[in-house]
Image: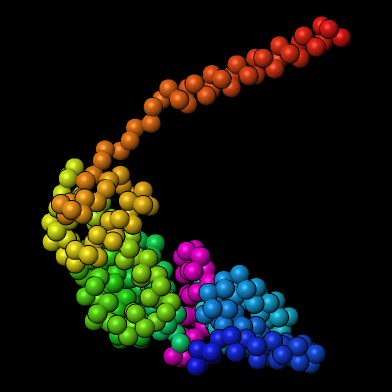
Amino acid sequence: MENKEYSEALNLLSGLIKEVRRLDDKLLLVDIDLLESKLHFSLRNLPKAKASLTAARTAANAIYVPPAQQGNIDLQSGILHAEEKDYKTAYSYFFEAFEAFNALEDPRAVFSLKYMLLCKIMVSQADDVASIISSKAGLQYVGPELDAMKAVADAHAKRSLKLFEIALSDFKAQLEEDPIVHRHLSSLYDTLLEQNLCRLIEPFSRVEIAHIAELIELPVDHLEKKLSQMILDKKFAGTLDQGAGCLVIFDDPKTDAIFPATLETISNIGKVVDSLYVRSAKIMA
């Protein structure tokens, strides 16, 4: 797993699981199921990752599990819930993991705290980040990991792409090289970019792409790709006139109220005809 040879690691584990089940060593089984969950998650197989985690929890419920191992289970649970965008549940799991690691003075406590802050940012509660960092527990772990999340929270609160990009470059090791944080921040960056673009193009019916690029401080080719993606995703109605280097924005097409009313009328006529048929059948009988 350390060498990122995930498939090979799974093959080794499958044989090991059979042996351990025969021995009925529950604690070792918890370790293996948890490792298997991490491997499946690394291979982007979320259903199997959840199944392995459930197996680890089931085995853990039958025995006494050391606090560090329970913290590991909670940390993995938080990661999987965050992946499903259930950030509130993920936050509670990360908090449980943080409390367990903090009590043991385990270095993994700072990562649990970092992911707690990530969840707050993802549910647009970036204002809570500073108060968590300045709390008694948070002050013990002040350093690059928490500074990175604070920079992202500030950028999100100000809805500034420029500050977001500065945070990503200043804290590359803490943000981009952490696969869990990086995945969520990519979707956050896209959301911020789309919100900013929609706000900028709102007053226009036709605008030069270069002008928008200047306003949002992004390269023109990058902006063109994003705008075409947003048009395809129906985030707004418009088209790119690449010959003139312009974005043409259409008015939102208004649905004609006559069509739903016509469908409703036809449906009602159908019901009347059905009830008349039933009545006539009774008379004929």
84 vs 45, nearest the viewer: 45
Please tell me whether residue 105 belongs to the stretch shown in magenta: yes
Q: In this view, does 139 lie above or below 118?
A: below
Q: Give the range drawn in magenta.
A: 79-107
Residue 119: percent from left, percent from top: 41, 68
The quarter of the rendered structure image containing the N terminus is bottom right
In the rendered view, does 255 fall on the left or right side of 249? right
At x 59% / y 19%, what residue is drawn? 268
181 vs 42, nearest the viewer: 42
The quarter of the rendered structure image containing the C terminus is top right
At x 53% / y 89%, what residue is drawn? 5
Q: In which quarter of the image is residue 197?
A: bottom left
At x 40% / y 84%, what residue is drawn? 110
Residue 120: percent from left, percent from top: 38, 67
Name the outermost residue toward the front. 243
246 vs 182, nearest the viewer: 246
83 vs 74, nearest the viewer: 83
Q: In this view, does 131 lie above or below 195?
A: below
Residue 92: percent from left, percent from top: 50, 70
Q: Can residue 113 be seen in this view?
A: no
Name the outermost residue toward the top. 283
Q: In which quarter of the image is residue 38?
A: bottom right
Residue 183: percent from left, percent from top: 41, 73
Q: How many marks?
A: 0
Q: Is residue 10 visible?
A: yes
In the rendered view, does 230 fall on the left or right side of 103? left
Q: Is residue 43 above or below residue 189?
A: below
Q: Quadrant of residue 27?
A: bottom right
Please tell me whether residue 254 belongs to the stretch shown in magenta: no
At x 47% / y 26%, what residue is drawn? 260
- Magenta residues, dominant SS class: helix
